[in-house]
Amino acid sequence: MELDSLPRRALLSRVGAALLSLFYPAHCAACGCRLPGEGSKEGVICDECRKSILPPPAHCCPTCSHPMARIFLCPNCDGRRWHLSVIVAACRYEGIVRELIQRFKYGRDQSLICLLGDLLVTALEDPRIKGKEFDAIVPVPLHSLREREREFNQSDLLASRLGKKLGIPVIRALKRTRATAPQAGFDRTRRMENLEGAFALRRPIRSDATILLVDDVTTTGTTLDACAAILREEGASEVCAVTIARG
């Protein structure tokens, strides 16, 4: 009887997919154009939009990924001691990527988590970090007031997506001890002053752990390094960071 029902199940499945495609066709998450294929899918973009996503510069600082075309000393690393081993971004914070991240963060469009999370995964193909084994993924925390206002922490959602993809535990090990002014528009010195004493340990980590920090965007790396400093003080053996984009 079960064998006889198999063709009917297959037929019903095909009919269901056709109806889903008819009434809920898949659309590009970026430009909104209709996509070929069966049924509605979250986090899918068209070929043209995917081609417009700009990869990181070919020549960049091996530590902070600052563009290094025609220069030999990284101006972002000059005079600073990093607690991070490396910061890797999947792409540039321009065009469609910038629009998608802003829709995700400020427009609360959580349907983009699949697309943005998959972009984040591509950062792990960077030779500076590829093949490295991590004990835990730690998201950069938001202050509780800002998280209540936004209703979620974008870094936490990205870290969870990445953790599921890689099979690595996500530990919310850090907290913000005070609400800081937005970093946008500040130079490197002001960013460092703004974040002084802004992070603390929320829960313990293994003393010799290798940690992967996750955030959505990095510019000077100041926020990521402030988080790494706390983790290193607590005994982490190494901290690396990945973001979707670099501004």
Image (cartoon, rainbow, N blue to C red):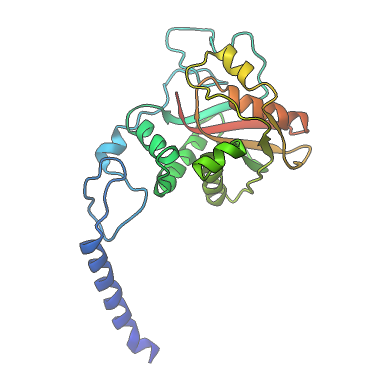
Tell me residue 203's x, y (percent).
74, 42
Q: How many marks?
A: 0
Tell me residue 191's x, y (percent).
58, 18
Q: Toward the viewer: 4 or 240? A: 240
Quarter of the figure that contains the N terminus: bottom left
Residue placed farthest to the bottom in the image? 1
Q: Toward the viewer: 197 or 1? A: 197
Which residue is pictured at 65% across the width and 43% down the height? 172
Q: Is residue 85 visible?
A: no
* Residue 70 in the image: above or below residue 225: above
Q: Is residue 195 visible?
A: yes
Which residue is pictured at 56% across the width and 27% down the height? 87
* Residue 129 in the image: above or below residue 149: above
Q: Is residue 232 left or right of residue 224?
A: right
Q: Toward the viewer: 29 or 135? A: 29
- Residue 86 placement: quadrant: top right
